[in-house]
Amino acid sequence: MLVSIFNDVIGPVMRGPSSSHCAAALRIGRLARDLMEGEFDDCLVEFDRGGSLPTTHDSQGSDMGLFGGLLGWEATDERLPGSMQTLADSGVRIRIETVDAGDPHPSTYRLTLTGKQGSISLHAISTGGGMIEVIRLDGFAVALGGDAFTTLLWVDAPATRLRDELALREEIDAVLVHERPAATTTLVEIRSVAPLPPPLVAALGGRVGVTRVRELAPVLPVLSRHDTAVPFSTAADLLARDGAAGRALWQLAIEYEMARGGLDEATVERMMVEIVRILRRSIAAGIAGTTYADRVLGWQSGGFDAALRQGKLLDGGALNRAILYVTALMEVKSSMGVIVAMPTAGACAALPGVVIALAEGMELGELEMARAFLAAGLVGAFIATAWTFAAEVGGCQAEGGAASAMAAAALVGLAGGSAERSLAAASMALQNMIGLICDPIANRVEAPCLGKNVSAAANALSSANMALAGFDPVIPLDEVIATARRVAAQMPRELRCTALGGLSITPTSLAIEARLAAARTGCGSGGCGCH
């Protein structure tokens, strides 16, 4: 699946502490709900003992996301903290178990749903930043990303003829046939960019040998087609394609996303302007004040704002406003407010905080901010294509490091710098954050995440100014991304978002975690807002 700026990099718009836990799990839950047509009374969730989820699924939002998705809720639904209780109150039996499965991906969800119409089992992975892939369905190896309208047929007969018939229809984009060794049943997967006509679905269900039909709605904003192509997938490709044209990075980003999503230029800019407006509302909400019981840090952005206005802080220039905005966004996230994963929820504040702060200082409008985010999104697309945003895989260098690189490129664009200088800034910013571990205190995505987001913003500003002044990044961006990926493979599991190493296991961290756990247990059904 080709990376989309709006699918993989800038977004989802969501609530929750972690996009790779909460938003991804919600998308998995939504697909699973469609597979059962919303009717089930038993839900078994299994996590591999060797992965990251046994120690993080509760405190980092996997549970509330998954059960919210099974209820059919959106990622912005304010009821998400109580989704598990709501699902249980509806009569569904919920079991969460840790098993020795040997799953190769650390964020693997094994889900079995049972109801009056039978059961389904699926294995899905959270690939980072809210992106997912269903890799196994009822024993069939599949690759469902939630980026198309998908109709599934279980067929107790050879499906070759059916596949060939369906492939000729205009409304169908692709037909795939999945088989299992020594099994008579095949799974036919039909992808389209719009729902199939109901008469066609009914006719398919009535064919000889078809035992089950299920329709899955997409869970991503930008849909995919089998013949989708993008003009470039690396920084080197981009520079070679643009040549002497000298276009700004945001212009190249629009070209990329138009090709990737079949969108026009006005739609791409409109979608990003709406993201800007959401972010500005969230920043204002954070500064005004946030409350939430189950968090490590309280409201601190208001105090920073007051100290800044009273002249009590050191002269940091535009960076002080960026720190304020970064802090406000992180506090909105930790209080279950609406944020935008950029590229993840854990690193949601560095990029928008510094870009919006600098743009406001330069008296630029929302369209200029949107274009800066598009430039950032293209750098993120290069990172996601070659690597990951998942801290479970890459440590915080994959989240904070990526966010800083993206922000550096965006800032160069705000200043009118070229695409080449934007990519140089991104390279320098990511170089400075290689090796950054992920070690959330008290198993919450708050600290040291706040400080890392602030550091990522400051690093982005420094790198942008260095690039604008003509500094040599020495190592091209593509090679820096490849290096970060190699370093990630050398990191122990304990330092990759498992809460089993680093600051996570200090006495103070463990004490805070125990205190918060006791408070959650003591508040019963979750009416206090803890759950």
Image: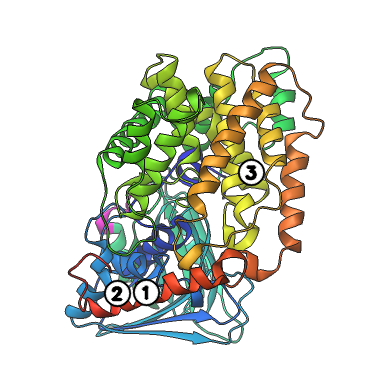
Q: Is residue 232 left or right of residue 183?
A: right
Do the residues under discs 2 and 3 have CB atoms within 8 angstroms? no
Element under disc 2: helix
User: Residue at the location (58% across, 75% down)?
Assistant: 51
Q: Is residue 518 left or right of residue 446?
A: left
Q: Nearer the viewer, residue 486 or 104?
A: 486
- Using the rendered image of the protein, determine whether residue 208 is visible from the camera's viewpoint: no
Q: Which residue is mark 3?
A: 383
Specify the amino acid type for callout 3: Ile
Of mark 1 and mark 3, the one earlier in the sequence is: 3
Element under disc 1: helix
Q: Which residue is mark 1?
A: 515
Distance from disc 2 to disc 1, alpha carbons, whole Å, reads 6 Å
Q: Is residue 530 above or below residue 424?
A: below
In the displayed image of the protein, which residue is found farthest to the front? Answer: 312
Crowdedness of circle 3 by 10 Å Cα count: few (<14), some, many (20+)? many
Q: Position of residue 210 (x, y in %)?
A: 38, 75
Q: What's drawn in magenta, residue-wise?
A: 194-199
Q: Which residue is mark 2?
A: 519
